[in-house]
Image: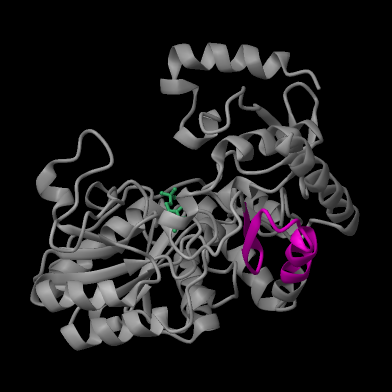
Amino acid sequence: MTTAQSEALFHRAQQSIPGGVNSPVRAFRAVGGTPRFIARGEGSHIFDVDGNEYIDYVCSWGPLLLGHRPKPVIDAIASVLDLGTSFGAPTSREVELAELIIDAVPSIEMVRLVNSGTEACMSALRLARGVTGRELTVKFEGCYHGHVDSLLVKAGSGIATLSLPDTAGVPRCFSETTLALPFNDLDRVETAFHEHGDRIAAVIVEPVAGNMGCIPPQPGFLQGLRRISNHYGALLIFDEVMTGFRLSRGGAQALYGVAPDITTLGKIIGGGLPIAAYGGRADLMKRLAPAGPVYQAGTLSGNPVAVTAGIAMLRYLEQHPEVYETLDKISAEIVAGLPADVRVNRAGSMFTIFFQPGPLADYAAARRSDTARFGRFFHELLNRGVYFPPSQFEAAFVSTEHRPDDVVFTRKAIREALAAASA
Ligand SMILES: *Cc1c(COP(=O)(O)O)cnc(C)c1O
């Protein structure tokens, strides 16, 4: 496999773009080597600038539930280009997309469109603080809610000690508004609320975690969060940027039967273009400007091209409810019967092969994985034409375009790569 063109581009990119990439994980730092520059995608496959072909399990980090260039979405985008690309004024299509989201996601009565998952989570948090008049947030270690200042903390050194930032550039006073607790640990949530309950505005959680690798909630965890937040008058925010429209049309909340107060969405709802959203109970959402006192705005929010792609995607899912069973079957097959020295965590069409035998229910356990071995596994797969996320702490995604021959090819490649990576 030659990678000369990718290497040349990566070298050039590093002169003009920090680290050569526009989002850090793309740089392959966690696994070493040169990131592939992608020329095009079709269905479940991507092609790099050197002409190498890969079966894609990143799928743009989640949005491409229907694979690359799905016809309904591509046709819809083409049809809107004749009308204009942005007006900064309301359009009928925004109303249509809002109605589609409300129809699909049980707890959402009103919704506001934004441009990224980061923006959705940041705004949801502001709304929660605005409504409750409180300042603290509970989050869970290993959960990612975009690069929101106060949420870039993972390592709570205990509930009595407020958190330190994970990044340069975040004032201590921002990160100190966040209590980071272990995922799946309700006792710690109880204790945090017992001590700080009257100051906690919201609990924010990935209902199925995907950003420390795939870690599903243990039975009762989400229900417990609902009960405790209700008891203390805090809002429950489900960050379904990854899981929304992926685990079911109603997201994780429909699967687990727990209704949050606010939900954030992104990725799939843009059909591969930049859209995200936050929505929830109407009485809360009506507190947003211009209806209420909590300000939030966006020049390109509800952009007609992106909204049109989103509508095409959500209409397709509305009309093809069988998609979720198909996706579940494909991903189950891919990871069935792997050796016992790795641990597979899977929820529907998202999964992670962890390089430790498990059990694996929180970030501390995920961190015990053998990341050096994962790096070798990743490159062995890549060389065989299978493109997995370049980090142990990411979920792989399956699309409806992953065909039986892709599955057979991938199963064989995974076995060979596992063997080669242990050597
Ligand atoms: C991807 C993701 C985000 C951030 O979305 P961006 O569009 O990258 O800003 C937030 N939360 C979760 C759960 C995500 O997976």
Q: Is residue 20 above or below residue 235?
A: above
Q: Which quadrant, please, contains the N terminus?
A: top right
Q: How many marks?
A: 0
Residue drawn at 59 percent across, 52 percent down = 356
Q: Does 114 sit above or below residue 17?
A: below
Closer to the camera, 287 or 88? Answer: 287
In depth, the one of 49 and 97 nearer the eye is 49
Q: Which residues are magenta?
A: 327-353
The reply to whether the magenta stretch includes residue 343 is yes
Q: State which quadrant residue 261 falls in.
A: bottom left
In which quadrant is the C terminus drawn? Answer: top right
Q: Is residue 210 visible?
A: yes
Residue 258, position as x, y percentages in the image? 43, 84
Q: Is residue 342 magenta?
A: yes
User: Residue 373 at what x, y percent from top left?
Assistant: 63, 38
Res 287 visible: no
Q: Position of residue 409 (x, y in %)?
A: 87, 48
Is 390 situated left or right of 402 in this image?
left
Residue under the image location 27 percent in, 70 percent down: 203
Residue 391 x %, y %: 55, 41
Q: How is the image coloured?
A: one colour
State the residue in front, 236 or 188.
Answer: 188
The residue located at (19%, 46%) in the rendering is 164
